[in-house]
Amino acid sequence: MAINKMMRAALKALSYPDLHVKKTYKLQRQWDTFMTGQISPAKQLFEDWRVPKGNGSVPVRVFFPDAKKQLAPPVLLFFHGGGWVKGDINSYTRVCATLARSLDTVVISVNYRLAPEHRFPLGLEDCYHAAKMLYCSGFPFQVNPEDVTLMGDSAGGNLAAVVSQMARDRGEFAVKQQILIYPATYYDHSEHSPFPSVQKNGTDYLLTSKRVSDYMDMYAAKPEDKLNPYFAPLMAKDLKNQPRTLILTAEFDPLRDEGEAYGMRLLESGNDVTVVRVKDTLHGYFVLPMQYEPVRFSYEVIEKFLKGGK
């Protein structure tokens, strides 16, 4: 059913359109940490590893379909959402555990560096490095690249799309397929945005256009970064030779139209693309429990895509 007037009023009250994200992001991280403690699944379902990187490493959390902890294909390499500013492998533990169990796959969640402490492209390079190590070096285990799918939601969907572009441009590995959940693909979420969903859905729901703009300001190291296709993948001039792609968008999401536009650009460039708009949903719906019908529907679409269907 559609969102009714009472729900719309409640969502508007929760949206805090004037919230100063740049001043409150640390509190938001603390809230995420608190909530994680309330919903984390049993620890026997995952292990924490570190991907070597120069003199340091990139933390990852490896989730298994069951307690046997078998490292076997297929694999989802997952990049979490949070506007590049918040979220981590802890706050996405329940989501990734559900993905592993429901889709019978190993899920590797990447704990990339966050802005504003680590601005573009540092977190992105963490994601790319984790992907390169999996595809090229067999870390954390040897797997056929054909059995690996990149996946991310929101800012994580942005990162997955960009890692695919970078892989093609750098020629170090090829991504077979990717799943982008309500991805951020464009740089402008002001009144000048070319996308109607920014104006229509940008004030009355949980993710406002102002918040998106604030997150992007915190992610960018300098203003011109926003025009970089590795920041806003829709800015890419060439989208040929990209992976087989599934894009899920949310009906009442300011990012809806830019996600669908990215799918159209991929399709026009000769790629295999499926775009599904999930009705009666808000940005962030995918992290809700499986009891929520749109989440169950999304899993059905994802499972079909992973098995080669449209």
Image (cartoon, grey):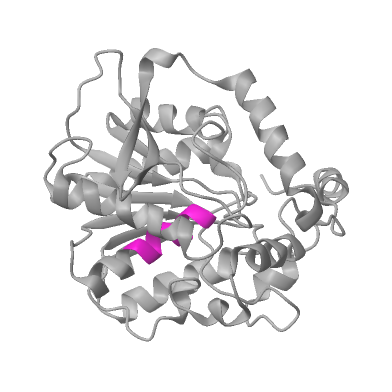
Q: Quadrant of residue 192?
A: bottom right
Residue 109 in the image, given as x and y percentages of width and height:
40, 39
Specify start and end residues of the magenta stretch as a single range.
Answer: 154-163
The residue closer to the viewer here, 180 or 167, is 167
Q: Is residue 111 left or right of residue 57?
A: right
Residue 37 in the image, given as x and y percentages of width and height:
62, 20
* Residue in view at x 26 percent, y 56 percent: 177
* Residue in view at x 62 percent, y 79 percent: 223
Residue 127 in the image, given as x and y percentages of width and height:
38, 53
Q: Is residue 160 above or below residue 95?
A: below
* Residue in view at x 17 percent, y 45 percent: 147
Q: Is residue 135 left or right of residue 280?
A: left
Residue 276 visible in rendering: no
| Residue 156 shown in magenta | yes
Q: Is residue 199 above or below residue 58?
A: below
* Main secondary-structure element of the magenta-colored stretch: helix
